[in-house]
Amino acid sequence: MANSSVSTPVEGKNKLWGVITASSVGTLIEWYDFYIFGSLATILSTQFFPLENPTAAFLSTLATFAAGFIVRPFGALVFGRLGDLIGRKYTFLLTLVLMGGSTFAIGLIPGFATIGYAAPILVLLLRLIQGLALGGEYGGAATYVAEHAPPNRRGFYTSFIQTTATMGLFLSLGVILLIRHLVGVDAFNSWGWRIPFILSSVLVFVSIVIRMKMHESPLFAKVKAEGKTVKNPLKESFGKKENLKMVLLALFGATAGQGVIWYTGQFYALSFIQKTMSVEFVQSNYIIAIGLLLATPFFIVFGGWSDKIGRRNIMMAGMLCGILFYRPIYKQMYALSDVTTMVEVPASSKIERQTNKNEAGESQVVQTTERHFADGTIQRKITSQTENSKLVESTEIVLPTSSFWILVALVFVQVLFVTMVYGPIAAFLVELFPTNIRYTSMSLPYHIGNGVFGGLTPFIAISLTSLPGATPFDGLWYPIGVAALCLIIGLVYINKNTYNTTND
């Protein structure tokens, strides 16, 4: 008897870590698949859209990226319903297959130069499938882990699922940089960018094998065995006043603000560094990757802390930090690459001109003008022109070591805000709804908040800064405004009794 009493909790804990690992690996790969597109947005805009207007091509790429976010709520409805009817395990096996297949296919689509407007149309369709699949993935994984975890430790254990979104972005950046290094810059821009998409098929296969060995969650299995599953989860979730109230509170009191904080700190930060600051491609990705790596453990810190002091205050504090500090942070970021405020060293400047052949076999003249500044900053202006095309210009900034690490610190602070709002939110959402409608009920507000409010952040922010007379910082009014609205509603209407229940 003594041996039995000792081994049981150990076995239970080992099983729980197995559940977390299996769920996290699959979710990590789905986020990797989803983020490759955003990480390569600058290059993809030249591959799948006309080149006559680079700004319009980039905005079109961001719009296609955002489309995948917009349909996530529909995926939440479709797969959330399946998850509450047939179970968690098989539903997010299906989402994994759809996500992996779509990502692989994007890597095979010919460019605009080959098939014209069929290219962006095909990419858009596959992005929509990705968005639908991701709409069903997160809710299933978070619910699955939460339903295995002890109620008083849900924040801690579900926070490991929360790390997968950031680690998926980190993994996508790592793979992109590695392949770019292996094949070279020109080859990567021409065809090497396809490799990260195609590689996802291997990762998805491994994840499917792992997930096939998983069992259904004990809470859902119990509900199913007792005949307490609902015939119409959608009607139960959104047709009943008390449940609909919780759905709306989850959206406007938590996930909308969490979504804009998340996508500002990760994706808009990358877009701002690359497009507004014009920081060189490899440097910009290293900056984001290091910031993500340093901040990721704090998902677990704040998730575990929420078990002790409650979910709301930590999430609201993260939103408040974004509201107060985004504009000062981004002004400091911009100053690091603003050469108009720097002292130039003319003696170090140089101009190089070379002639080569482009992909079409045309003679192309490329001129690089390099300016050096006293703090070590280097600005390169690159122009290229063929006999049959107009002049194409681009600018890139190479930061000195000191500025590089200051920018890493500023990105780290933004991701720290992300960990505050995102670390506790899975447990918060799980505890709002009963087991028999949990997958459906929590998935919809999560994916509207993240997919619509959050996913549109880079597109809306960059669009705002493109308006006549706009400053580089005007795009921040969108996440600040959404976070402020969410903060007010969350502080007024969310209290400990709202979510601190077992709901089992």
Image: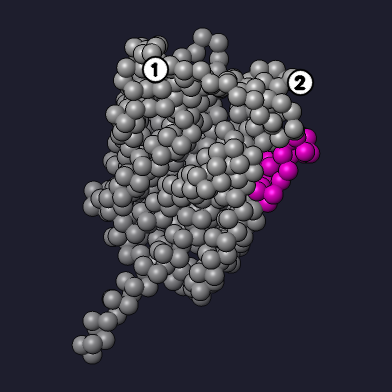
Report how many numbered discs are placed on residues in the image: 2
Q: Which residue is mark 1?
A: 348
| Dot 2 alpha-carbon crowd within 10 angstroms: few under 14, some 14 to 19, many 20 or more | few
Quarter of the rendering containing residue 99: bottom right
Residue 75 can be seen, yes or no: no
* Separation (CA) of disc 1 from disc 2: 34 Å
Q: Please state if 43 lies on the left or on the right of 369 as rendered.
A: right
Q: Please state if 371 lies on the left or on the right of 118 as rendered.
A: left
Q: Secondary structure at mark 2?
A: loop
Observer-nearest of 18 and 179: 179
Residue 272 in picture, x, y percent from top left: 46, 27
- Which segment did they paint magenta? 105-130
Residue 219 in picture, x, y percent from top left: 44, 68
Observer-nearest of 175 and 443: 175
SS assignment for the magenta stretch, majority: helix
Q: Nearer the viewer, mark 1 or mark 2?
A: 1
